Amino acid sequence: MYFCVKFLIVAIDKSKYLSQTLQNLEESATLKMTKLARQLKAQGHDVISLSIGEPDFDTPNFIKEAAKQALDDGYTKYTPVNGLLELREAICTKLKRDNNLNYSPENIVVSNGAKQSISNLCNALLDPGDEVIIFTPYWVSYFDIVRLAGGTPVQLKADIQQDFKVNATQLAEAITEKTKLIIFSSPCNPTGSVYTKDELAALVEVLDKYDSLFIASDEIYEYINFGEKHTSLAEFESVKDQVITINGMSKGYAMTGWRIGYMAAPAWLAKACTKVQGQVTSGATSFGQKAASVALLTGPAASLEMKASYLRRKKLVQTMLGEIPGIKINDPQGAFYIFPDISYYFGKSKGKVRLENANDFAEMLLNDAHVAVVSGSAFGNDDCFRLSYAAADEVLVEALTRIKHFLSSLS
């Protein structure tokens, strides 16, 4: 005799066992929108993604050839945690040539992308209760990197009327006895705004009063600058020992997948960040570092060719956005983003779906017009959205045409 026993299999949700820190962590909005766009595309939809911050250019051939040569030469082993001496020397050469900054290899830490450099810094500096002023709009990961490191992020907001740039008065009023670190980017992701030398000088007048306060200056878009020559905050001698300059190969050299970033910092802090990285990832890719050395010593000529294309595209996008009623835009002087204010359309509807905020706009635009952008709420501004113009001209024209038609369909 045989018996048939049926078992009821119940899926048990074990996510409750995840750390509270992780449960409070937000998914990267840029990566989330890119994922959703890919899913729609896989379903057969004609999706245009302007959501990710990645150059559409290929890495220049001379850099790829340098990596191939490094592989042939056997550079396939572990590297020092803080980076190959050859690359750290090349970074010092670059900083002197382009930024008039004098650093030694002991001041440099090479990481697996600039994001890790920022994470290393926060983990090296912050204790629970330490406040970190983040100029807002901010790059999407600053906020949660600070939280992961135990710090308390404090948003210091600037709107489109200020060209999205925090001024000295705001900064002076925001600093408290708990402030340990300030983080900002110039050229800025997501707004494309660039702090001029005079604007930085005004901030320095405030910072001069606080010698125990540190500033992370994210300059990853340095080479994509359409206005005056880029100014590094560390060029101001009075605060140089408080400044940590963050940079990398991803944007200027179209090397996003290579994951090579770096920081320039006081030697004691560089040593501390090396200690952190040694317990997380160790050194960056060996042959990638060799190629990065060649790129930096060759100089930014290839980057300047890309910049010319970005400038043309920026003007194209501004012209087409300017034809859409109600949208407000600034004139970004760097990076490859524009950050339009879409609040004019809040309260309007399409069918039974009502647009209340930038999150609704990004979701409705993706589902209705199949254009992926990122809600400004991910960057600390609920009225705007980020559009990347790192795409071919014809792609941008089609995307902006769809956006215009979508907005005109609202009532």
Image (spheres, rainbow, N blue to C red):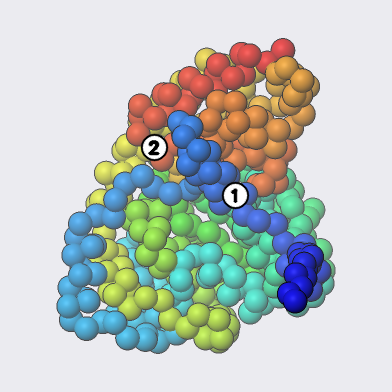
Query: To which quarter of the image does residue 308 belong?
Result: top left
Q: Nearer the viewer, residue 54 or 119?
A: 54
216 left or right, relative to 11: left
Which residue: 50% across, 38% down?
43
Question: In this picture, is 400 found above or below 302?
Answer: above
Query: To which quarter of the image does residue 89 belong?
Result: bottom left
Q: Quadrant of the N terminus?
A: bottom right
> x%, y% of residue 21?
76, 69
Indicate the amino acid at tag 1. Lys
Which residue: 74% across, 32% down?
357
Which residue: 58% across, 75% down?
120
Per the image, label 1 sits on a secondary structure element best described as helix
Q: Is the residue marked by circle 2 packed among few (<14), some (14-19), or many (20+) residues within 10 Å?
A: some
Rounded to the nearest angstrom, the CA distance separating label 2 from label 1 is 19 Å
Residue where numbered disc 2 is placed: 391
Residue where numbered disc 1 is placed: 32
Indicate the amino acid at tag 2. Ala
Q: Nearer the viewer, residue 344 or 178?
A: 344
Which residue: 18% across, 81% down?
73
Question: In this picture, is 368 found above or below 91?
Answer: above
> x%, y% of residue 190?
56, 44
Q: Is residue 338 visible?
A: no
The first of marks 2 and 1 along the sequence is 1
208 left or right, relative to 13: left
Query: To which quarter of the image does residue 260 belong?
Result: bottom left
> x%, y% of residue 220?
46, 57
Q: Which mark is residue 69?
A: none
Q: Nearer the viewer, residue 45 or 406?
A: 45
Per the image, label 2 sits on a secondary structure element best described as loop
Callout 2–callout 1 Cβ contact below 8 Å: no
> x%, y% of residue 405?
55, 16
Q: Nearer the viewer, residue 66 or 333?
A: 66
